[in-house]
Amino acid sequence: MNKLDRRTKPFSEAKIGPAPQIGRCVATDHPTLPGRVRVQLGETASPRWMPTMRGLRVRVHDRVLVTHPENWSEPLVVGVVDGLLPVERLPSPVADLELKPNEALRIVNARREPILELTTDDDGRPLLALVHPDLELSTPGELRLSASKVSVCASRGDVRIAASHDVVVTGEVVHLN
């Protein structure tokens, strides 16, 4: 078999037939090709690097569904089988985004209107701006804000506090007006 044949049929030993198979992901960090994961098909087969469908998030130890399309030269990971492993916390970011002075990270909606902007002030402190003029912050559970010091300021208009139960204000000294 010449070099070209080996390149176009690299996974013939994997014995992928017309029926999809279940494999186990053993690595996700291909040294040069993003979108490939190393999959073990059975206990005796050697693990092999296989491409994945775009957008598929595969973790090490995930069980994956592998198929070999007739008109494709290698097996393809087409899905992750859910429910076999507990969901872990998301891993640390794999990349950092550096904001240089006078730069901002902006999130826009489908109409390209800005929603949120993250930047830094002159001293390097982060500034998070919700760009839309109105905001509703809601959660089905408890909302907690924590900091060494908290200030609430309305530049125009009232500050209103409403509750369906008691409003409790505690502090060493409470000043009202």
Image: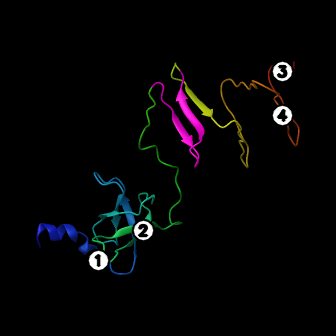
Distance from Cα at disc 1 to Cα at disc 4: 66 Å
Residue type, label 2: Val
Q: Of marks 2 and 3, which one's residue comes earlier in the chain?
A: 2
Q: Are marks 1 and 4 in contact (CB under 8 Å)?
A: no
Residue 94 as seen in the image, left or right of residue 155 = left
Q: Which residue is mark 1?
A: 15
Position of residue 10 measured from the top left corner of the image (x, y, whole percent)? 23, 69
Residue range in magenta is 101-121
Q: Of marks 2 and 1, which one's residue comes earlier in the chain?
A: 1
| Front position among marks 3 and 4 | 4
Q: Dot 1, crowdedness within 10 Å: few (<14), some or many (≥20)?
A: few
> Which corner quadrant holds the C terminus?
top right
Position of residue 84 measured from the top left corner of the image (x, y, whole percent)? 51, 66
Q: Quadrant of residue 132?
A: top right
Q: Dot 2, crowdedness within 10 Å: few (<14), some or many (≥20)?
A: some
Is residue 110 in the magenta section? Answer: yes
Q: Dot 4, crowdedness within 10 Å: few (<14), some or many (≥20)?
A: few
Q: Are marks 1 and 3 in contact (CB under 8 Å)?
A: no
Q: Which residue is mark 3?
A: 174
Distance from Cα at disc 2 to Cα at disc 3: 61 Å
Instruction: Name the element at disc 1.
Output: loop
Residue type, label 1: Lys
Residue type, label 4: Ile
Residue type, label 3: Val
Height in image: 3 above or below 95? below
